Amino acid sequence: MRKIELVIPSREKDLGSFSVRRILPYASHRMVGPFIFFDHMGPADFPPGQGMTVRPHPHIHLSTVTYLFDGVIHHRDSLGSDQLIEPGDINWMTAGNGIVHSERSPESFKKTGGKVNGIQCWVALPEEHQDVEPSFHHHPSETLPEFEINGAKLKLLLGSAFNRQSPVKVHSDLFYLDVNLLQGSELHLPCDGREGAVYLVNGRVEAGDVTLEPYSMAVGHTGEPLVVKALTDSRFMLLGGKSVGERFIYWNFISTSKENLEKAKADWAAGPGNTKRFPKISGDDNEFIPLPPEDVNPPGTPL
């Protein structure tokens, strides 16, 4: 049986209006392939009149990925993008040199309340693509490949796997899939020289030589196949890819150098709209998340 390198438990983080379960970055394993950030939002139940509120904030040198199981999120950014994301869709936002975005529950959701449940990831851009122009692309659920293998229902969200390719334009060799596996079924993913991991959303599975509980991630050895067997009907995410090298992290910024982080910090501290790098968001420019104090999240440390 293939051995798993590491099991990463989730750590709950309070974001004010709701909590998330954070997996990456982890102290002893900060990235899986190019994936440097992995949050499970919820599951959270909002009563009528309430909802998710993530005020405008900046990013550099990464792409963000939002994928929902339940709920709806209103995305706006400094490019002028104004998009609802619903279950099964992919929002792929490339920060490049710099972008500002916000994520909120739309008014229609807040009238009735409801559940929000989904995954947010950051994918580190290769060094040669760090300073590309920012961009945003929305991919509706029906545009993403769905297929079955040996009792597994799979949806390919990003990259390539099982001889299939997602339509999302990415910048490095990676894979990201949503998998539903029936009890007793087994799935083999050849990683082809890439690092891979399994994140369990619900159910119970064997990943390699470990039994995985919900809200935890099993990281395999680079290049070795991932083997997952469902002990109950289960849903999990498969993710990974080839390494793009180490990154420094400060708050919402990542980069290959601390100097880049310092410049981004200074630009955001000047306030949105006061630098070309971080413009205001049209329609959502009355508030923003300020740069956190140095002692809260020192440069180069995990979130």
Image (tube, rainbow, N blue to C red):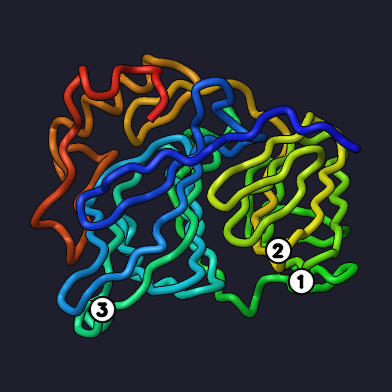
Question: In the rendered view, does 191 fall on the left or right side of 33?
Answer: right
Q: Residue at x 47, y 49 (%)?
A: 64
Q: Decide: is 291 above or below 66.
A: above
Identify the residue position indicated by label 2 in the image.
Answer: 179
Q: Place residue 300 in its image quadrant.
A: top left
Question: In the rendered view, does 63 fall on the left or right side of 182?
Answer: left
Q: Position of residue 78 (x, y in %)?
A: 29, 54
The answer to whether residue 276 of the structure is visible from this angle is yes
Q: Position of residue 244 (x, y in %)?
A: 64, 29
Q: Residue at x 44, y 65 (%)?
A: 117
Farthest residue toward the left? Answer: 286
Q: In the rendered structure, are the residues bearing label 3 and label 1 in contact, judged by CB atoms less than 8 Å apart?
A: no
**Residue 167, which numbered label?**
none
Q: Secondary structure at mark 2?
A: strand
Q: Residues within 10 Å of mark 3 (few under 14, many from 20)?
A: some
State the CA–CA distance, disc 2 to disc 1. Answer: 6 Å
Q: Secondary structure at mark 1?
A: strand
Label 2 sits on what residue type?
Answer: Val
Number of labelled discs? 3
Q: Position of residue 90 (x, y in %)?
A: 54, 65
Quadrant where the N terminus is found in the figure: top right
Q: In the rendered structure, are the residues bearing label 2 and label 1 in contact, judged by CB atoms less than 8 Å apart?
A: yes
Q: Residue at x 27, y 79 (%)?
A: 109
State the CA–CA distance, disc 3 to disc 1. Answer: 30 Å
Tell which of 148 and 271 is nearer to you. Answer: 148
**Residue 113, which numbered label?**
3
The answer to whether residue 155 of the structure is visible from this angle is no
Label 1 sits on what residue type?
Answer: Lys
Tell which of 31 and 279 is nearer to you. Answer: 31
Quadrant where the C terminus is found in the figure: top left
Identify the residue position indicated by label 1 in the image.
Answer: 153
Earlier-in-chain disc, 3 versus 2: 3
